[in-house]
Amino acid sequence: MAWVRACGVSEIKPGEAVRIDAEPPVAVFNIDGEFFATADTCTHEEASLADGYVDGAQVECAWHFAKFCLRTGRALSLPATEDLATYRVRVADDAVFIDI
Ligand code: FES
């Protein structure tokens, strides 16, 4: 595990997400100024969840509409049955860091 700079705080607007090219890719979400990081790849198929629809503290996959909790990574609806990995997030010096 290592803290890695993901992006600047201002690069993710509230209700949006960015995909970080890590291995595996990570999605960082801004929920009303609070940042969360999960695996970017949907556990159903290969969609990028950074391209999904953020609704409160949930993201809905753009491909087949599975929903995941951004706080816990839990799969909340079919067709996803497997939870997402989540990563710790820290904000410092106007940047978002993720523990990957
Ligand atoms: S790839 Fe996400 S629900 Fe199918």
Image: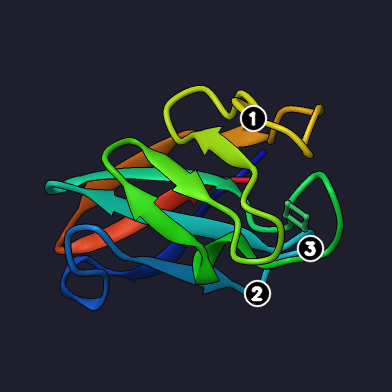
Mark 1 or 3: in front is 1
Residue kind at label 3, given as amino acid type: Glu
| Mark with earlier residue (1, 2) | 2
Q: Residue 26: name its quadrant.
A: bottom right
Q: Is residue 90 left or right of residue 76?
A: left
Q: Position of residue 24 (x, y in %)?
A: 78, 59
Rounded to the nearest whole Å, what is the CA distance between mark 1 and mark 2? 26 Å
In which quadrant is the N terminus drawn? Answer: top right
Q: Position of residue 35 (x, y in %)?
A: 29, 46
Residue kind at label 2, given as amino acid type: Asp
Residue, far right? 45
User: Which residue is labeled 3 in the image?
Assistant: 23
Q: Position of residue 96 (x, y in %)?
A: 31, 57
Q: Residue at x 83, y 47 (%)?
A: 44
Rounded to the nearest whole Å, what is the CA distance between mark 3 and mark 2? 7 Å
- Please, which colouring scheme is shown? rainbow
| Ligand 1 contact, mark 2 (Cβ < 8 Å) | no
Rounded to the nearest whole Å, what is the CA distance between mark 1 and mark 3? 26 Å
Q: Residue at x 73, y 33 (%)?
A: 78
Q: Mark 3 Cα within 10 Å, few/some/many (few <14, many 20+)?
A: few
Q: Residue 83: name its quadrant.
A: top right
Which numbered dot is residue 77? Answer: 1
Q: Residue at x 47, y 34 (%)?
A: 88
- Above or below, 86 against 39 in this view is above
- Secondary structure, mark 3, is loop
Residue kind at label 1, given as amino acid type: Ser
Q: Mark 1 Cα within 10 Å, few/some/many (few <14, many 20+)?
A: some
Q: Residue at x 44, y 65 (%)?
A: 6
Which numbered dot is residue 21? Answer: 2
| Mark with earlier residue (1, 3) | 3
Q: Position of residue 45 (x, y in %)?
A: 86, 57
